[in-house]
Amino acid sequence: MKRWLPGFIFFVLPTIFAAQGEYENNTITSGQLSGEVCSYNALTDKLVFQFALQVGFSNDSNSHSLNITDHLVQYGGRVLLHYALSSRFKVAAGFGAWSNPEAPDAGQYNYNEIRSFVQLKHYITPRRATITNRFRMEQRFVQNQENTKYEYKPRLRYSPKAVYALNSNVVRAKTVHAYCMGEIFVTPGVDPILKQIRLLAGMGYNFSKDVSLEIDYGWQWLYSNTAPDFRATIIGLTLNYNNAFTW
């Protein structure tokens, strides 16, 4: 159980974490803080089971608040099963459930969401670096604004990511690494079709071969009819466990 203690401590961190929003024309823009605990467990040489818990907060720019934990905007989790086709390609399938409390800044009403998804991930591994391209197709079932029924809203996601080991040739125990990533969200058949763009850069540290912590900073753009061109600053914290069920 001692292996899980840092995870519980980490998951509470967002509730006491505060940060300043950005100033633009004497107004405060939206800021968001997200936390995630993620576990990867090898079942065979090619099969890996993953599960993750997530929580997200934001400030209230309408009241000129600088506290990035004003509103709980999302919490939930997902599970995936990864299969290695080769050293360069992996496929995965999974499902998840999220609750999304109301966030007026982003045009978000209070709703729950259930989704299943399949993905393909491609790996390139030059010296000291790992570059990935992830393609994900999501089958989403989202509550309507009245919370009376679930509506089918499929979505496509593409996310490139580059990780670079700063003090080692590979990412391993005691390694500090830098990374950058982006993500594009597309909703076929819905106006606007481009729903979200996310850009992040961060640093990570591997405490051991099984435990690592990452913190990143970035920007997110949301496009919707209720909140066109909404932009938020993002701070993210991710704690990763490998083989967490090895007691």
Image (tube, rainbow, N blue to C red):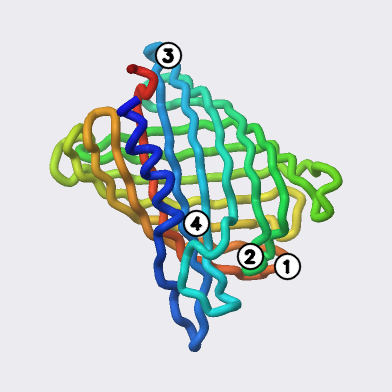
Q: Which residue is mark 2?
A: 106
Q: Quadrant of residue 210?
A: top left
Q: Which residue is mark 1?
A: 226
Camera-side mark, 3 or 4: 3
Residue at position x 58%, y 28% in the image: 94
Residue at position x 28%, y 51% in the image: 203
Q: Which residue is mark 3?
A: 43
| Placement of 241 over or under 217, stated as above or below | above
Locate the C terminus and report the quarter of the image it occupies.
Answer: top left
Reading the chain from its start, which is encountered first: label 1 or label 4? 4
**Does 144 sit left or right of 179 as displayed?**
right
**Helix, strand or loop status at disc 1:** loop
Q: Quadrant of residue 152?
A: top right
**Helix, strand or loop status at disc 3:** loop
Q: Position of residue 245 (x, y in %)?
A: 39, 19
> How far is disc 2 from disc 1 in space, using C-alphas?
8 Å
Q: Are marks 2 and 1 in contact (CB under 8 Å)?
A: no
Foreground residue, 245 or 131? Answer: 245
Callout 4 amino acid:
Arg
Q: Position of residue 104 (x, y in %)?
A: 67, 67
Reading the chain from its start, which is encountered first: label 4 or label 2? 2
Residue at position x 59%, y 56% in the image: 73
Reading the chain from its start, which is encountered first: label 2 or label 3? 3
Residue at position x 55%, y 75% in the image: 61
Q: Which residue is mark 4?
A: 198
**Helix, strand or loop status at disc 4:** strand
